Image: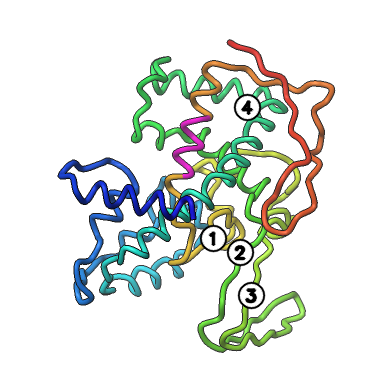
Amino acid sequence: MFFIDLIRRVMSERKQSDKKHNDFMQLLMDVEREDNNTTTTTGADSVATDAMFGHHLSEGIDELKVEKQALSGVVEKKLTSAEIVAQCALFLIAGYETSAQTLSYCVYELALNPDIQDLLVKETKEAFNENTADIDYETLCRLPLLDAFVSETLRHYPVGLRTIREAAEDVVLTGGSDGSKVKIEKGVIVEIPLYAIHHSPDNFPDPFAFKPDRFLPQNRHNIKPYTYLPFGAGPRNCIGMRFALLEIKLVVAKMIQQFRFYGVPDTDVPVVFTPGYNLLQADRLIVGVEKR
């Protein structure tokens, strides 16, 4: 209730002011409907097919075309106040722990891979002329090694262990080398085991090795559709994907310019995970850190 009351209070205060804010809540409030019949037509811009984010959804070309066509004529309803509150609460609750965990794994891999750490320092220094106080969005998005490093971290440590979908219609899937078929009836809940998919040697050679090269632009074509799913896929992929990626990249870029991370005797290799069902949590992540 604390978050809900907080969000409602902030919304009420903003409605009484003419000042616009450059944040997520303002974006939602800008599409808040005033009556029950207000609608607006949208295109397929919500599909992440651009070079900077498309590979994080790991969809095939044919699937993306179908998705674009399906969304091209969609009539998008405006949001109610209750829906805005729900989305803001989701951003606060679901986004904090997952991003924090991912950043912890990033630091862990930086400590274990000093050669990769040095290359990232070099890439970010050249991109920002050693002025990390003024890192801009466009430049941050154009750093191939940083993107590959974050992508491999998300593959190796998918914080969300599973994703869930409900079958919208009856479907028969053909699976396995024997050609066996599985019927999934409408309404059946299907759980997709992300960690298992990300660590299958059929999908990623040497899956337990940390290799950012897999996600460099010249190698992305080797990734099979729907085998890399840290943010899910399709129209119901993670709403906070772009924000999370930029947040993680920004923090990593800032940290490596100021600190060096390294392994210590207490560093667990490999990571020891805490048993759980929803989030991939390490028992502990201990590394050394010193100021550059």
Q: Is residue 157 above or below residue 136?
A: below
Q: Nearer the viewer, residue 53 or 18?
A: 18
Residue indicated by mark 4:
116
Q: Residue furthest right?
A: 265
Which amino acid type corresponds to the residue marked 2 in the rendered image? Thr
Q: Residue at x 52, y 18 (%)?
A: 257
Q: Amino acid at mark 4?
A: Ile
Q: Are marks 1 and 2 in contact (CB under 8 Å)?
A: yes
In front of the other: label 4 or label 1? 1
Res. 202 in view:
no
250 part of magenta stretch: yes
Q: Look at the image and say whether residue 160 sits in the magenta stretch.
A: no
Q: Is residue 271 above or below residue 161?
A: above
Instruction: Kindly identify which numbered label has been placed on residue 232.
Output: 1
* Range covered by the magenta-colored residues: 244-251
Q: Mark 4 and mark 3 in contact? Answer it, CB < 8 Å.
A: no
| Residue 183: quadrant of the picture | bottom right
Q: Earlier in the sequence, mark 4 or mark 3?
A: 4
Query: Looking at the rendered structure, which numbered label has been put on residue 163?
Result: 2
Front-most of residues 126 and 268? 268
Position in image of residue 32 (x %, y %): 25, 61
Classify mark 1: residues with Cα within 10 Å, few (<14), some (14-19) or many (20+).
Answer: many
How many other residues sit within 10 Å of disc 2, few (<14), some (14-19) or many (≥20)? some
Whole-number angstrom distance, CA of label 4 to CA of label 1? 27 Å
Most common secondary structure along the magenta stretch = helix
Q: If the image is split into quadrants, where does the C terminus sit? A: top right
Find the residue positioned furthest to the top: 292
CA–CA distance in space, label 1 to label 2 = 7 Å
Q: Which numbered disc, 1 or 3, marks the residue that appears first in the sequence?
A: 3
